[in-house]
Image: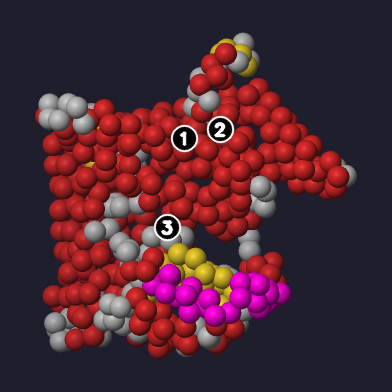
């Protein structure tokens, strides 16, 4: 496997049709995302076989190359450097008409909504992870009574981003919907401004942060529509003065006297529903959530859960859903290990598993999904069984009153341990989560070993 990002980027470029075929470049946690003028020019078989490429996903107008965490950022930088020989304007122009035509033909309202949710929240995940880890470390120090002079500083560093996350959501929302990002951030900042406590709406005083990220998203979205309306109607000579003023004023008043209250009610309902679901039907809820998460990841529908996770973290300090959903990755790891044992004479598949398993243990499931379980078919289903078993295990303890949560989103598998939190303390939370992982590994392994391979898959 090539480990030099420059080599990987140089090998990728001709296989996706060369610089002339690439219209835009981006990346998420694990995937290099390319918009291509003509996807038919991609040499997909050679691309999948390229050392360093863990999988390929085609999503309408987006071509996604799975490279894994860490590696994807470095390869993307080298890839963009190669494209830098062509001007940004030329890249934007090439294939733009074909790209827009594909979007109009393939895009559905649901797909567009999910893509936009991802574009708003996915860029925030690195900060959520970093602050979440620091919050966990600070909690350990406080509980142990260590470094009392340092813990206030750590608490400030870990909490500052979450206190202002509404501003970042507003900025990204305006950017995604074609508004001025700083105006989106300005309107969303109203949600967390301490002075809103002096404002009364519906007969009740507002609370700073009421409505959270959902209120910020709604405020920035409204601000974007107001801004666009103004741009079309305000004379050019007055645009620089009136448009920002009217945008902030109209959207700000609507936020104070409507959106914050409504979003606050929705946010409260989300928290109440999540807690009720786990305390009342924990085992069943864990079974369903853990069993269905891999298909959601495969289809990209898991992005819809990001605002829910973020809302729960804002409200409760952690999301109780993520540790259960992380069990899907445990089932995937167990299934891959069973395939490795059963197909002992298949050198190719065993090599793929050896290279992808470390990432799978750390919660990055795409290499195992696209390199092992999906191509074989049945192991994907038995991996879901493993995820369901692990989810049910964690759900049982939620019914008993011991909830496990995560202070940030993004990591899962073993990488989630530093982010764990719960009402029974870190030790209990870690033990329950570890038990769920072991259950997912075991169930995924056993069901795959017994039922996951056909006679043609296994040499017997």
Q: Residue at x 26, y 28 (%)?
A: 152
Quote the CA–CA distance across marks 3 and 1: 30 Å
Quadrant assignment for the N terminus: bottom left
- Decide if residue 331 is in sight here: no
Looking at the rendered structure, which numbered label has been put on residue 69? none
Instruction: Report which quarter residue 385 is drawn in.
Output: bottom left
Judging depth in this view, the residue of 382 and 260 nearest the camera is: 260
| Residue at disc 2, secondary structure | helix
Q: Quadrant of the C terminus?
A: bottom left
Q: Which residues are magenta?
A: 75-99
- Residue 187 image-quadrant placement: top right
- Indicate left or right for 5 with 402 as reference: right
- Examine the rendering and report whether any part of residue 167 can be seen: yes
Observer-side mark, 3 or 1, equals: 1
Task: Give yes or no for residue 77 being in the magenta stretch.
Answer: yes
- Secondary-structure class at tag 3: helix
Q: Which residue is mark 2?
A: 189
Quadrant in the rendering for residue 403: top left
Label placed on residue 296: 3
Compared across the picture, whether 249 is left or right of 233 comes to: left
Q: Which residue is mark 1?
A: 164
First in sequence: mark 3 vs mark 1? 1
Q: Are circles 1 and 2 on residues that touch, CB within 8 Å?
A: yes
Q: Position of residue 27 (x, y in %)?
A: 45, 64
Render colour scheme: secondary structure
Q: Residue furthest top?
A: 203
Q: Quick check: 10 above or below 246?
A: below
Q: Which residue appears at 66% of the width and 47% of the height?
A: 180
Residue 348 location (% of width, % of height) = 23, 85
Determine the CA span between mark 1 and mark 2: 8 Å
Residue drawn at 47 percent across, 43 percent down: 307
């Amino acid at each position: 496997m090539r480990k030099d990002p420059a080599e990987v980027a140089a090998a990728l470029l001709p296989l996706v049709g060369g610089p002339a075929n690439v219209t835009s470049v981006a990346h998420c946690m694990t995937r290099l995302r390319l918009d291509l003028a003509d996807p038919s020019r991609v040499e997909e078989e050679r691309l999948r076989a390229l050392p360093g490429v863990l999988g390929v996903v085609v999503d309408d107008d987006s071509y996604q190359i799975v490279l894994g965490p860490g590696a994807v950022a470095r390869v993307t930088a080298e890839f963009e450097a190669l494209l830098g020989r062509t001007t940004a304007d030329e890249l934007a122009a090439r294939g733009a008409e074909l790209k827009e035509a594909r979007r109009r033909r393939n895009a559905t309202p649901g797909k567009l909504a999910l893509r936009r949710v991802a574009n708003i929240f996915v860029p925030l995940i690195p900060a959520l992870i970093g602050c979440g880890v620091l919050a966990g470390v600070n909690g350990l120090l406080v509980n142990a009574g260590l470094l009392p002079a340092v813990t206030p500083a750590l608490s400030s560093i870990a909490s500052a981003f979450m206190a202002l996350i509404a501003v970042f959501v507003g900025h990204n929302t305006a950017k995604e919907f074609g508004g001025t990002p700083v105006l989106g951030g300005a309107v969303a900042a109203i949600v967390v401004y301490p002075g809103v406590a002096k404002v009364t709406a519906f007969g009740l005083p507002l609370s700073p942060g009421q409505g959270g990220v959902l209120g910020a998203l709604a405020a920035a979205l409204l601000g974007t529509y107001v801004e666009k309306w103004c741009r079309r109607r305000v004379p050019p000579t007055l645009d620089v003065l009136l448009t920002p003023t009217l945008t902030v004023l109209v959207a700000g008043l609507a936020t104070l006297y409507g959106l914050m209250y409504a979003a606050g009610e929705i946010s409260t309902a989300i928290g109440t529903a999540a807690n009720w679901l786990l305390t009342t039907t924990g085992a069943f809820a864990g079974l369903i959530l853990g069993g269905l998460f891999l298909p959601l990841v495969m289809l990209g529908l898991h992005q819809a859960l990001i605002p829910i996770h973020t809302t729960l973290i804002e409200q409760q300090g952690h999301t109780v859903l993520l540790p259960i959903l992380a069990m899907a990755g445990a089932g995937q790891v167990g299934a891959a290990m069973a395939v490795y044992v059963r197909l002992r004479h298949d050198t190719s598949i065993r090599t793929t598993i050896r290279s992808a398993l470390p990432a799978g243990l750390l919660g990055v499931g795409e290499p195992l999904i696209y390199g092992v379980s999906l191509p074989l078919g049945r192991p994907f289903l038995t991996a879901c069984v493993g995820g369901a078993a692990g989810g049910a295990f964690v759900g049982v303890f939620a019914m008993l009153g011991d909830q496990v949560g995560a202070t940030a989103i993004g990591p899962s598998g073993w990488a989630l341990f530093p982010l764990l939190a719960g009402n029974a303390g870190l030790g209990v939370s870690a033990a329950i989560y570890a038990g769920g992982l072991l259950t997912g590994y075991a169930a995924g392994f056993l069901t795959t070993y017994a039922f996951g391979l056909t006679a043609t898959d296994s040499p017997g």
